[in-house]
Image: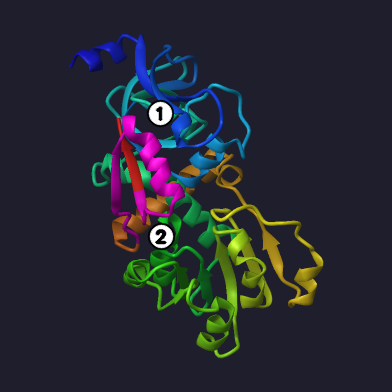
Amino acid sequence: MMRHLKILEFSMTKAIRIHRTGGPEVMVLEDIDLPKPAKGEVLVRNHAVGLNFIDIYFRQGSYPTQLPFTPGNEGAGEVLAVGRGVSEFKVGDRVAYVSTLGSYAEARIVPAASLIKLPKSISYEMGAAMMLKGLTAQYLLRRTFKVKPGDTILVHAAAGGVGLILCQWGKALGATVIGTVGSAEKAKLAKKAGAKHVILYKDEDFVARVKEITKGKLCDVVYDGVGKDTFPGSLDCLRPLGMFVSYGSASGQLDAFNIGLLSQKGSLFATRPTLFSYIAKREDYVAMAKDLMRAISKGDVTIPIHARYKLADAAQAHADLGGRKTTGAAVLIP
């Protein structure tokens, strides 16, 4: 109760801070000032915070930002206060968000434009875990390449947070889903999620297996969140005029991309999208979130939480995530 009152008085909150880039050990739990929400802003008490690979990129300095900073781009919780001009949200509302850095904290200021109302049917933990990963899957399947019945899609890291959602939603959209994973345990998860075929890429040549599975017809789209380890093999899995979608680089950034490869391998399309480009307009953001929540309410998509960490244990969470010891979604609990 004392901590809750403290937050309501806009004094201090506990947050993970990074003063220098590096390994998981650079993250420290500190008390920081908690300002009052300004015009167009909302104060949110985080009940759960999403854990994502992009957080590691920021921590390592791959995505440069001003030091010191608090990592994390998504969370879910309750509104404690609103600034001037905010009419869409009120104190007590359940909300989820994808926003600028600052989520690894007990409470934080969030622009009202970054908030989505969270129905009671969706828990805070699922709300925190679904925003970045779920909305990423939404734009990949519904906008970057609009998957339709009869399509064949290849999902790398099919047992990861985004991968499991892509498998479920891709199947629900009528596609044949082929997934690649790194272990037999992860293969079971991908299969359960909706992958019709699962390839153990450490034991098998995934390109040869894709050709075998599709009887040489190959895939309409490849969703690649792995990066260096799966390139340029991913291009060899695509039919002529197919699309290569590179949305992450868990194994490292792609080396210099010779664009001539696209013509050589069948006049392919290639894109490197980011969620924040797709949700830049409020109306698009709201529509995408509604589409995601509709898929969840229909049962097409579930987002099981496979790991929970205390906020103070964020370093261990990053070590596990970076070491590929996690599957599905993981959250921090302030």
Q: Earlier in the sequence, mark 1 or mark 2?
A: 1
Q: Categorize mark 1 by other alpha carbons within 10 Å: few (<14), some (14-19), many (20+).
A: few
Magenta-colored stretch includes residue 303: yes
The residue labelled by disc 2 is 165
How far is mark 1 from mark 2, CA to CA? 29 Å
**Above or below, comparing residue 72 to residue 305 in the picture:** above
Q: Is residue 76 visible?
A: yes
Q: Secondary structure at mark 2?
A: helix
**Above or below, comparing residue 284 to residue 295 in the picture:** above
Q: Nearer the viewer, residue 170 or 155?
A: 155
Which residue is rendered at x = 47% and y = 63% of the image? Answer: 157
Tag 2: amino acid? Ile
| View extreme (bottom): residue | 215
Q: Nearer the viewer, residue 211 or 47?
A: 211
Residue 233, image x, y percentages: 63, 72
Magenta-colored stretch includes residue 334: no
Q: Which residues are magenta?
A: 301-329
Disc assigned to residue 253: none
